[in-house]
Amino acid sequence: MTRFTRLIVAAFVTSASCAALAGPELLNVSYDVMRDFYKDLNPAFVKAYRAKMGEDVVVQQSHGGSGKQARAVIDGLEADVITMNMPPDIDALYDKAKLVPENWAARLPNDSLPFTSLQVLIVRKGNPKQIKDWSDLIKPDVQVVMPNPKVTGNGRYSYLAAWGYALKQPGGSEQKAREFVAAILKNVPVLDSGGRAATTTFMQRGIGDVLLTFENEAEMIAREFGHGGFEVIYPSLSVRAEPPVTLVDKVVDKKGTRKQAEEYLKFLWTPAAQEIAAQNYLRPQDPTVARKYASQFPAVKLFTVEEVFGGWRKAQKTHFDDGGSFDQVYARK
Amino acid sequence: MAELTNPVPDAALRLPMQRVDHPSAPSRAGMMQFKQASVLPGFNLALGYTVVYLSLIVLLPLSALVLKTTSLSWSAFWQVVTADQVMAAYRLTFGASLLAAVINLFAGLLVAWVLVRYEFVGKRLIDALVDLPFALPTAVAGIALTTLYAPNGLIGEWLVPLGIQVAFKPLGIVVALTFIGLPFVVRTVQPVLQDLEAELEEAAACLGASRWQTFRKVIFPATVPALLTGFTLAFARAVGEYGSVIFIAGNIPFESEIVPLLIIGKLEQYDYAGATAIATVMLVISFGLIFLINLIQWWHTRRHGMRK
């Protein structure tokens, strides 16, 4: 018993002294598909930070569904920085717990978006159903796989992309967009609960003719399954995916890590970090890096949620909250 | 668990014997008292501990759930929990759970029977396999089942040409819930069958009972309480299951959307009150059903003269 107690005390002392040696610790609460990006980025940051400030810093990662992660932070998970896949998940930090100021997005360049992505169509090799654009998704013999817009940011982006496309066609109207999106949803046999789950359904289960997802997810598919099985189709018009980052004021002030957190976020805009983003198929904001990687990012006409839907709050309420346009599509059946 | 006094109803075997209480059973009057004189010490301490523990582990989180719901007005609550989409999800979740529990009731009894009554090579291995659904992370179970039953899966590719689609349909949900519920029935029935002495069956046979009569009048009544317990556990587990179902269900509203997914959907809108409202309804229905099954069990035990 005494030996056991001693062992435990020793373990505590060792871990405590390790933590003391390692210097301040940052927790980055992020979403699922960012795992690979931050795995590459964090070591680069630690090195750059040591060179600049002469101090060691440890970055811990937490990954999960975007909304679920945001709720964990609201409920008290002590995240120094939060990196989500859409702005509403950070707005919620202000709405529910005042953890960040209301104008958090204005604190960093590019509305706090260090990189962007967009929704693309992924089809089977050779494109047997000749899918070229959103309008091909309503053909009766086409099966569409996408994550559930009620529970995933990825699904919401695809839904809004299709809606915006229909709206911007000649003679487009709210009513036409509603009918267009309803016609696509009629071709959806599975609404997966996550972006990665939808990829699995499409690639491994062989369900569907087309998968709707982020451009950077296409690269993940290639890494996992090789380039042989699918093609990426860039539609004529798509929505800009906006994954924002911010520091959580209440947490950094309590932990005394504001300086480190600020450095961490600023680092995302340095050319080194922008290159890592580009290598993970996230479209960089830095023009020089963007030019360097231009060949892997075809130019696509994009609209933003702000432009077409009047902002995320409005889009969420009109389309995805209970009774919104998504629910109405299914309720009318 | 239950000890038999006279499991063979008299009329069936035409015996003039009347039911007698077990000689060592405490008298009825004694049973009615709150606290029974016992040779074991520490009743107050043990009861106090039980109450505190149950309150901390079970009642406290549940009351927090109900408390959160009270931020809704009564009419708003009613609107949330009776919306068409929610009603469809209740029907699916409770229907699939009941169906899966019924399948497990029969399959589980059979598995337990084979494991107790027969000797064969690899019996220990099969016995251990039964617990696998307990141990496996539910998401792994869901993904494995989906891989098997998807149209391009090992089983799915045979079923789909026959017009039977399992994965991404309500049928897939039943398959997943059957998988996770099996051990509950097997593990509750197994010890009871083990305790059932073979002499009882031999006696029944000697007294002229057919094999079917022996099963129906001797074995079955003895296992009913355990079967009901296993059924209840399997059902309760199935109602709350998320991890395994979410991969094999298509998650299409009104068709293959389970209640737990609706709760997640509410949370995605940061609608905590709405989420807890649905959860509270689930809790009340589940508690009602479990309570009902317990009542049946109690009634059965009394009727068949078994000592709890």
Image: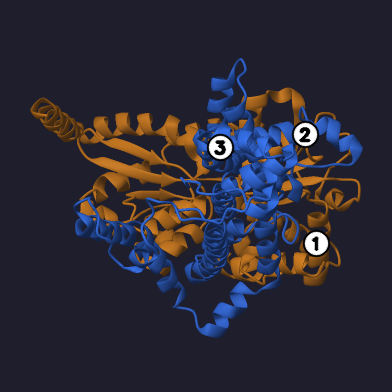
Chain colours: A orange, B blue
Q: Which label sits in the foreground, 1 or 3? A: 3
User: Of the residues shown, which amino acid type is indicated by label 1?
Assistant: Ala
Which chain is mark 2 on? A
Exactly how many numbered labels are in the figure?
3
Give the quarter of the image for residue A314.
Answer: bottom right
The residue closer to the viewer here, B187 or A115, is B187
Q: Nearer the viewer, residue A112 or A285?
A: A112
The secondary structure type at the circle numbered 3 is helix
Residue A148 shows in the view: no
Asked if one can make out residue A163 in the rendered structure from this viewpoint, the answer is yes
**SS at badge 2:** loop
Where's residue A330, x and y in %? 76, 64
Give me the chain letter of mark 1: A
Where is residue B232? Give x, y as percent.
Answer: 56, 53
- Give residue B117's position: percent from left, percent from top: 61, 28
Task: Calculate the distance from the C-alpha at mark 2 to the C-alpha at mark 1.
Answer: 23 Å
Q: Which residue is mark 1?
A: A182
Direction from residue A228 to residue B218 in the image, left or right: left
Does label 3 lie on the same chain as label 1?
no
Whether pointer 2 and pointer 1 mark residues with C-beta atoms closer than 8 Å, the reply is no
Q: Which residue is mark 3?
A: B193
Q: Earlier in the sequence, mark 2 or mark 1?
A: 1
Q: Classify mark 1: residues with Cα within 10 Å, few (<14), some (14-19) or many (20+).
A: many
Q: Is residue B46 above or below residue A206?
A: below
Point out the frontmost of discs 3 and 2. Answer: 3
Label 2: how many Cα within 10 Å (few below 14, some 14–19, many 20+): some
Q: Amino acid at mark 2?
A: Gly
Q: Which mark is residue A206?
A: 2
Q: What residue is at 88 percent from the left and 34 percent from the top? A: A128
A84 displayed left or right of A175: left
